[in-house]
Image (spheres, helix red, strand yellow):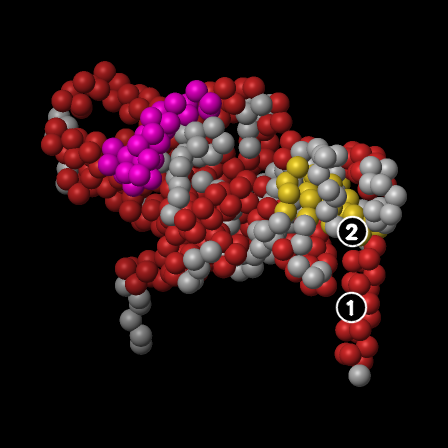
């Protein structure tokens, strides 16, 4: 008879399965979804760093510099030295990597929450639709959540071992949080309040017992990491000051930007149940329910046996505070909820194990196991749908102000015109949209050097041979095409697109191309068709 597998081997197999599942939900078809406007903005800014070694922290329009600098590694490994050589795969590989690290971090808490609970938390992180979807988003959020998790894990490991290595690593993660996004202050505040809550009246005695050298080492590590990034590696010291002044901008936007004002229950509604029309329903209710069970178990020794109750209670306080804070802030975008969803997932891991301890009969435990497995399959299926079938569809609750697939048709048509234009990609193009609302087109048209990006029609400049504009500018464009030029210098323009074309849902774009170019394109297509038939 063959010997049964040792527990460590079983655990290793499960960890590998979780890693494989996480990658399967994150890596395939990274280029399929159109770039979000925010992704494109970050990508263009990264281009200056890649091509010229230039990065200056902008405290008004951008978040921290870590995303840009960490993108250098996959870009260099791919052999890219110019932005035109970089593609969406290269960029999105950065959040995929940190999303995978986030999946693995709970495994460092096995002695605190139990091996089974840690595995469940890792698995839930892997299959959570929100976590999987935004792990493929070239924005700062996944990096921030990963570094926040690093602080929690390293903080716990240091508290248990008192080893200076964990203190330094804790400081590094603190510095990375600060260098990633200004919302890190919410996590810091929640952590501090949670610690005070679990320490109760013993906070001063706990602080006195800290090793001052270790605290100093952690502080130096945090400051060094933050200063390195914000100073652009000591080439722009002003960035250090701007990293502090940015909070004025953040606090102003938190309540005064009408475009992103949502009710307090916005995040919970997305997580609990969301359905648009006859499309599939979306829910991370399994995680919410298990998190409640885990939070309850934190205050019951029988249900949380084998787990560190102090850590569980810290996670309860931290998660409740983070959820409340983000819910009360009027400014909301769905990726912001990842910060407290991560806390819920950690509690859910403990809740899954506690649930079996609450249930005393085998039939009840069998039913619970079926519910858990079924719920897990549903979460994984939602992750697949979110990333492959509804990746730019508003029926997906994680899609927010997102460009639609028409973007690819716009770019394809511009490329087709460039192929038959004497100047190729150096042809003159004008894009006219109010309030610079043309993103992500600058990313997709980055190979075109002679593009003018306008917020209104400028009658003083000559009309380009190809113009893309918002419908509201059509009267002004027609006036510019046919009335301003003197007789004999007027060219006929025809529609560039075959039908109604959107940048985002209900945000139409129209294209205009000179008829002589259009006729040349038709001749080229006819000639290509005849050649293929021969």
Q: Which residue is drawn at 16% across and 20% down?
A: 205
Q: Badge 2: how crowded within 10 Å, few (<14), some, or many (20+)?
A: many
Give the structural element (helix, strand or loop) at label 2. strand
User: 411 or 362, which is in the foreground?
Assistant: 411
Give the structural element (helix, strand or loop) at label 1. helix
* Rendering coords of residue 395 (x, y %): 68, 42
* Rendering coords of residue 354 (x, y %): 39, 40
Identify the residue at the far right of this view.
Answer: 487
Q: In this view, does 316 lie to the left or right of 529?
A: left
User: 263 or 13, which is in the foreground?
Assistant: 263
Q: In terms of image quadrants, where is residue 168?
A: top left
User: 471 or 504, which is in the foreground?
Assistant: 471
In what quadrant of the picture does the N terminus appear?
bottom left
Q: Is residue 190 left or right of residue 370?
A: left
Q: Is residue 226 left or right of residue 137?
A: left
- Which label was assigned to residue 524? 1
**What span is colored magenta in the figure?**
222-250
Identify the residue at the far bottom of this view.
Answer: 534
Q: Do the residues labelled 2 and 1 touch (CB within 8 Å)?
A: no
Q: In terms of image quadrants, where is residue 189?
A: top left
In what quadrant of the picture does the C terminus appear?
bottom right
* Rendering coords of residue 4 (x, y %): 31, 67
Identify the residue at the far top of this view.
Answer: 201
Q: How many labels does the image show?
A: 2
Q: Badge 1: how crowded within 10 Å, few (<14), some, or many (20+)?
A: some
Return the residue at label 2.
513
Magenta part mainly helix, strand or loop? helix
Where 299 falls versus 21 (above or below)? above
Q: In terms of image quadrants, where is residue 472?
A: top right
User: 162 or 310, which is in the foreground?
Assistant: 162
* Rendering coords of residue 212 (x, y %): 12, 28
Disc 2/disc 1 C-alpha distance (Å): 16 Å
């Amino acid at each position: 008879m063959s010997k049964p597998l040792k527990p460590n081997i079983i655990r290793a197999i499960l960890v590998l399965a979780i890693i494989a599942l996480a990658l399967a939900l994150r890596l395939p078809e990274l280029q399929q979804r159109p770039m979000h406007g925010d992704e494109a903005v970050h990508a263009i800014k990264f281009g200056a760093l890649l091509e010229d070694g230039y990065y200056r922290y902008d405290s008004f329009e951008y978040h921290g510099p870590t995303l840009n600098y960490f993108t250098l590694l996959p870009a260099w490994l791919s052999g890219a030295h110019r932005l035109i050589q970089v593609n969406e795969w290269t960029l999105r590989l950065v959040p995929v990597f940190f999303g995978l690290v986030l999946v693995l971090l709970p495994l460092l808490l096995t002695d605190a929450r139990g091996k089974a609970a840690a595995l469940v938390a890792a698995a839930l992180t892997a299959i959570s639709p929100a976590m999987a979807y935004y792990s493929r988003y070239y924005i700062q959020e996944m990096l921030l959540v990963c570094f926040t998790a690093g602080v929690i894990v390293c903080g716990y490991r240091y508290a248990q071992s008192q080893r200076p290595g964990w203190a330094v690593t804790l400081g590094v993660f603190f510095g990375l949080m600060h260098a990633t996004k200004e919302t890190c202050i919410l996590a810091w505040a929640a952590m501090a309040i949670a610690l005070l809550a679990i320490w109760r009246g013993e906070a001063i005695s706990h602080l006195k017992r800290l090793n001052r050298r270790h605290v100093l080492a952690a502080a130096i590590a945090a400051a060094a990491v933050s200063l390195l990034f914000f100073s652009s590696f000591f080439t722009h010291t002003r960035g250090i000051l701007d990293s502090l002044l940015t909070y004025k901008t953040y606090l102003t936007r938190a309540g005064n930007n009408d475009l992103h004002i949502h009710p307090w229950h916005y995040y919970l509604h997305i997580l609990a149940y969301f359905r648009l029309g006859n499309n599939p329903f979306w829910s991370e209710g399994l995680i919410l329910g298990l998190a409640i069970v885990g939070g309850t178990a934190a205050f019951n020794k029988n249900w949380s046996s084998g787990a560190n109750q102090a850590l569980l209670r810290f996670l309860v306080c931290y998660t409740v505070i983070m959820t409340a804070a983000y819910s009360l802030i009027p400014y909301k975008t769905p990726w912001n909820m990842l910060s407290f969803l991560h806390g819920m997932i950690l509690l859910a891991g403990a809740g899954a194990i506690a649930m079996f301890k609450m249930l005393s009969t085998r039939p009840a435990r069998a039913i619970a196991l079926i519910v858990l497995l079924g719920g897990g399959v549903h979460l994984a299926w939602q992750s697949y749908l979110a990333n492959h079938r509804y990746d730019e569809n508003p029926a997906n609750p994680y899609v927010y102000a997102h460009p639609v697939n028409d973007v690819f048709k716009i770019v394809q048509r511009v490329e087709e015109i460039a192929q038959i234009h004497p100047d190729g990609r150096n042809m003159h193009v004008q894009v006219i949209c109010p309030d610079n609302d043309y993103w992500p087109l600058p990313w997709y048209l980055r190979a075109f050097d002679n593009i003018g990006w306008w917020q209104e029609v400028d009658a003083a400049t000559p009309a380009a041979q190809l113009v893309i504009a918002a419908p509201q500018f059509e009267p002004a464009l027609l006036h510019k095409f046919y009335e301003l030029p003197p007789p004999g210098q007027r060219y006929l323009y025809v529609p560039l697109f075959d039908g109604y074309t959107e940048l985002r849902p209900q945000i139409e774009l129209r294209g205009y191309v000179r008829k002589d170019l259009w006729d040349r394109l038709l001749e080229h297509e006819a000639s290509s068709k005849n050649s293929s038939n021969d």
